[in-house]
Image: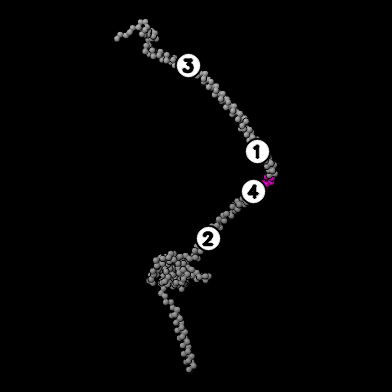
Amino acid sequence: MENRSHAFMTGIFTISLLVAAVFFGIWFNRDRVQYDPYLIATTLAVPGLNPQAAVRYRGLEVGKVDEIDFDPKAAGQILVHLSIDPATPITRTTFATLGYQGVTGIAYIQLDDESVGSPALGTSKKNPSRIPLRPGLFDQLEKRGKAILEQAENVTGKLNTLLSPENQKTMLSAFSDVSETAREYRELPKQLGPTLDKLPALAEQTDRAVRSVNELADSATQLSRSLQGPDGAVTRITAAVDRAATSVEAVTSGVELEALPSITGLTDETKSSMRAVRRTMNTLNERPQSILFGAPQVAPGPGEPGFTAPAK
């Protein structure tokens, strides 16, 4: 009986010690930090996110996910309840994305901020503040993948249209034309062969023609020098022209000396005649009857017979 009682007491003591150790461990490891409640309301999918998942601010663990449920006020909206360390700088520009740990696919909440120095976002247990959830890397890849698939489908459709039977016939016809053109180009050197063979002779003739032109230019230069030289034809012709001009000038001077007196006398006679005509016209204007009776007799002057002195 004593052995059984001793064993029973030993068992009770061992069990009590284990229970005390467990409670001591729980109490010792108990988190004494008072977390602030926040809320994420989103219509995006949250695959791999579970309660007790970590919440990180730019890579640093600052809290955990408490609960995930549906919003009773908005159909299709998911509510994610967060507990975050009060020392975390949650501001009005803070946003959340879903991150994934390695290849396990376990999701966590990644917090980040658009700018530094934004106003702090206050919260309370009765009215927890909401942090917006933005599409993560996988969501963006999914959207980009869909866009890429749509573009691939469009390209495939265009390729099918390009490779339609009618276009295939057109391309085959174009290839045939290209082949025929290539054959014609291959025959072109054969056709140009005789012309290329004549090129050396043609070049020699061209050289002879150039030499002849050079010789002709030299001859023209010599002729120009001989004509323009001191005893050249141009000089002689110029001298002859100067002498002829001198002779013409001398003849002109002689003619002027012989004809000028006669012209002067003729001019004087013309002037006298014009004065006589003018006097006659004046007389006719004063005595028109002189045409019928003749000109009146002129009274005798002093010393002439019949002169009578006028009375005083």
Residue 181 in picture, x, y percent from top left: 64, 48
Q: Residue furthest bottom?
A: 1
Cα separation between marks 4 and 2: 41 Å
Q: Nearer the viewer, residue 244 or 143?
A: 244
Q: Which corner quadrant of the image does residue 81 belong to?
A: bottom left
SS for callout 1: helix
- Of mark 2 and mark 3, the one earlier in the sequence is 2
Q: Which corner quadrant of the image does residue 276 belong to?
A: top left
Q: Nearer the viewer, mark 3 or mark 1?
A: 3
Residue 287 in picture, x, y percent from top left: 37, 11
At label 2, which amino acid type do we have? Answer: Ile
Neighbourhood count class around disc 3 (C-alpha, 10 Å): few under 14, some 14–19, many 20 upward: few
Give the magenta range.
176-195
Q: Nearer the viewer, residue 249 or 298?
A: 249
- Of mark 4 and mark 3, the one earlier in the sequence is 4
The image shows residue 73, relative to residue 287, as above or below, that is: below
Q: Nearer the viewer, mark 2 or mark 3?
A: 3
Residue 117 in picture, x, y percent from top left: 41, 65
At label 1, which amino acid type do we have? Answer: Asn
Q: Which residue position is annotated with label 4?
A: 181
Cα separation between marks 3 and 1: 70 Å
- Of mark 1 and mark 4, the one earlier in the sequence is 4
Tell me if residue 304 can be seen: yes
Q: Which residue position is annotated with label 2?
A: 148
Residue 246 in picture, x, y percent from top left: 56, 25
Q: Which residue position is annotated with label 1?
A: 214
Q: Which corner quadrant of the image does residue 249 belong to?
A: top right
Q: Which mark is residue 265?
A: 3
Quadrant for the C terminus, please: top left
In the image, what residue occupies the spot 53% across and 20% down?
A: 254
At label 4, which amino acid type do we have? Answer: Thr
- Of mark 3 and mark 1, the one earlier in the sequence is 1
